[in-house]
Image (cartoon, rainbow, N blue to C red):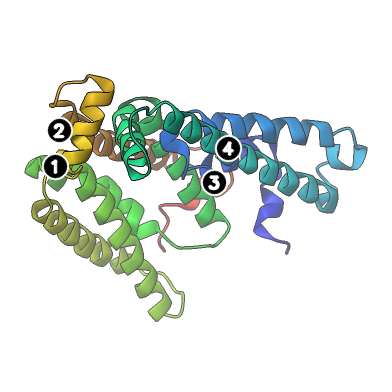
Amino acid sequence: MGLPINNLLSWRDLILMTLGFSFIVAPLGIPPFIGMLVAALIFGLSHIDEKVRNPKNKKERQEAFIASLVFGLLGSYIAAWFLLAQGLKQSEGFSGFGNLSVAAGGGIIAGLGLGVIMTAICLSFFINYGTVLGWWTPTGGLVTLLISIIPAMAIRRNAGINILTSFIVSSFVYALLVGDNKNKKEPWMVGQSAYIGIMVGTAVALALPSSGDVIPLKTKQMILEQTGLSSDIFAKSGEGAINSMALVIWFVYFIIWILTHVPGALPYGWDTLFKYK
């Protein structure tokens, strides 16, 4: 029967999987692109070997694919380390945790741009390939993700946290229900996990302070002195960055959900994300 990864040995899967597994450093924006280029370069060089070029040679192609993926991920995380190191060097006038706080706060502000979009996209690919490789069963969580935008927008408080918490809790509950049923999925499990996830997500959104109030006052003062920005940037960056990331993730999976109902070939595993029978 073969391993699931044997169906994922294409250029497309290498690029998307490299982006997906780089989601931790995606808030910095650029690192996933560096990793993608490194992975593509290594995989391209490996195609000098005729055995790797032939898709029928699963063993040789799998070895080249995994090596390219590993080097690509190393490229992503080394690039992230370099960017963080450069950011700390530019934080003059502070030392120790002061520098770290300024860099972290600056990262939140920068997250309004490319980092937010990349985090959402990379996290979506990570969820997808985790499902394809059999690491988890998040079907109920993904259905909840699409539904949770309704209460999140109605409450208008910590909408991004609401959506993400609903998704995580629902995925966990759905996995527990499937496991308790001897790994057999039932349609009612989706509704049950979605209900619990949305209830918990809404409660957390109402209980937590506004996202812009999370950064400590002393850290805010450091960032304002260092950057010269106005104080209202924190309300916009804290709430806006999380909300933007959640909305991009929601949009990505809304498109995937539409594609599952359109005839035609899809990337391996993507058409199974919302199947629960």
Comparing 1 with 23, the one in front is 23
Q: How far apart are marks 4 and 1 (CA)?
A: 31 Å
Disc 3 or 4, which lies upstream in sequence? 3
In the picture, the quarter occupied by the C terminus is: bottom left
48 versus 123 height, above or below? above
Q: How far apart are marks 3 and 4 (CA)?
A: 9 Å
| Mark 4 residue element | helix
Left or right for 52, reference 94:
right
Left or right for 19, reference 75:
left
Q: Mark 4 points at which residue?
A: 76
Contact between marks 1 and 2 (CB within 8 A): the answer is: yes
Q: Name the residue under label 3.
A: 21
| Mark 1 residue element | helix
Q: Which mark is residue 198?
A: none
Q: Which amino acid does label 1 sit on?
A: Asp
Q: Which amino acid does label 3 sit on?
A: Phe
